[in-house]
Image (cartoon, rainbow, N blue to C red):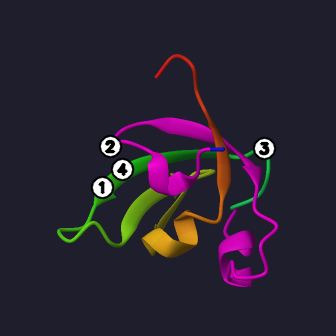
Amino acid sequence: MPTIADLKLGQSATIIDCSSEAIPFKLLEMGCLPGNKVKLLQVAPFLDPLYLNIDDAFVAIRRDTAALICIEIDPDE
């Protein structure tokens, strides 16, 4: 199953699962929950961190954390 770490620049998706205990609670509070939309806005120079728009909140997360969040990529992307 694809994760946020698999998104290409500008691509959008819907979060399917974020149940890993390694995901910081603060990220869940900021809207990283199943059913919410996520879009990859920018990638830092060494591919880490990723700058995302999650449910209208702008968030920068590490690639290893992004790899724990399962998504369904929007088909029209």
Cα distance in 3D space between marks 4 and 3? 19 Å
The amino acid type found where label 3 is placed reads Gly
User: How dense is the environment of label 3, judged by Cα within 10 Å: few (below 14), some, or many (20 and up)?
Assistant: some
Q: As drawn, which residue projects farthest toward the left?
A: 45
Q: Secondary structure at mark 4?
A: strand
The amino acid type found where label 1 is placed reads Gln
Cα distance in 3D space between marks 1 and 3? 22 Å
Please give the name of the residue rendered at 39% of the width and 62% of the height, measured from the top-left corner: 51
Tell whether 34 sits left or right of 50. Answer: right
User: How dense is the environment of label 1, judged by Cα within 10 Å: few (below 14), some, or many (20 and up)?
Assistant: some
Please give the name of the residue rendered at 66% of the width and 60% of the height, measured from the top-left corner: 69
Dots 2, 3 in contact, CB < 8 A:
no
Magenta stretch contains residue 74:
no
Magenta stretch contains residue 18:
yes
Which residue is tagged 1?
42
Q: Secondary structure at mark 2?
A: loop
**Magenta residues, start to end:** 2-31
Q: Secondary structure at mark 3?
A: loop
Vertical relation: 77 (above or below) 28: above
The amino acid type found where label 4 is placed reads Leu
Which residue is tagged 3?
35
Dots 1, 4 in contact, CB < 8 A:
yes
Please provide percent x and percent y for residue 61: 47, 72
Which residue is tagged 2?
9
Cα distance in 3D space between marks 1 and 4? 4 Å
Choose the circle earlier in sequence order: 2 or 3.
2
Tell whether 69 sits left or right of 67. Answer: right
Dots 1, 2 in contact, CB < 8 A:
yes
Which residue is tagged 4?
41
